[in-house]
Amino acid sequence: MTKRVIIVHRWDGEPDGDWYPWLREELEAKGFKVTVPAMPDTSEPKIDAWVSHLKKIVGQPDEDTYFIGHSIGCQTIMRYLETSNAKIGGMIFVAGWLFLRNLENVEVEEIARPWLTTPINFPRVKERTNKITVFLSSNDPFDCSRENEIDFKETLGARVFMEVNMGHFTGDDGVSKIPVVLKELLRMAEKK
């Protein structure tokens, strides 16, 4: 059975941006089937639209299906998984958040509000897999790394790694490759 990886980009992201093309190429070279869907209305992401789009892209997940989320993509994956009954192989979150500070303006705060206030059924998400890893950065511009580290450990029992000076892991932060994410996905996929 071919192992699948679905990478969900960030708010204002696109499939060919940031580090996604690099990771896709690395994983495809190792035999994975990789999908990086273009999420809808990326400048004003809405929970229902992103979750239903991801559901269409994924089809039927199984234990050979892995998810990698970036920023709001992590929330999208969790909200999708709380609607699923399938066991998956694992998930990796990069710059994932349940809490944010330092949003640019009122308009951005309004877009973020539903993502921050609509509850997630964490026990249900956790039932989908026991392989959950989160990568955060010591200098995330949204000043939320410590709170998110604690939240991900407490709510999902995630392994959390704090990387140094990676910002929000975007191309604007100079991040075009994240070798630790590749290494972690390969580690997850080899263990059953």
Image: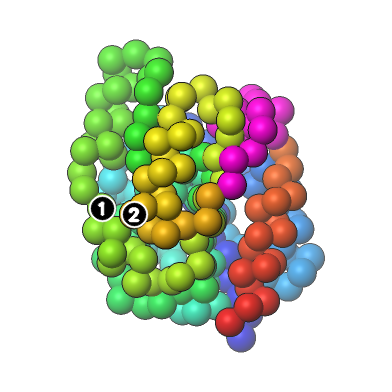
Residue 10 pos. (x, y %)? 49, 39
Q: For numbered disc 1, what is the local secondary structure? A: loop
Report crowding for label 2: few under 14, some 14 to 19, many 20 or more residues within 10 A (C-alpha). some
Discs 1, 2 touching: Cβ within 8 Å: yes
Q: Residue at x 38, y 58 (%)?
A: 156
Q: Is residue 18 visible?
A: no
Q: Horizontally, is 189 left or right of 97 in the view?
A: right
Q: Horizontally, is 43 left or right of 31 in the view?
A: left
Residue lying farthest to the right in this orientation: 29
**Above or below, 28 relative to 106:** below
Can you tell which mark lies on residue 154? none
Can you tell which mark lies on residue 120? 1
Q: Residue at x 38, y 71 (%)?
A: 128
Q: Horizontally, is 158 left or right of 114 in the view?
A: right
Residue lying farthest to the bottom in this orientation: 1
Q: Horizontally, is 103 left or right of 171 in the view?
A: left
**Above or below, 25 relative to 90:** above
Residue bounds of the magenta highlight: 161-175
Q: Residue at x 67, y 76 (%)?
A: 190
Report crowding for label 1: few under 14, some 14 to 19, many 20 or more residues within 10 A (C-alpha). some
Q: Nearer the viewer, residue 169 or 5?
A: 169
Helix, strand or loop: magenta stretch? loop
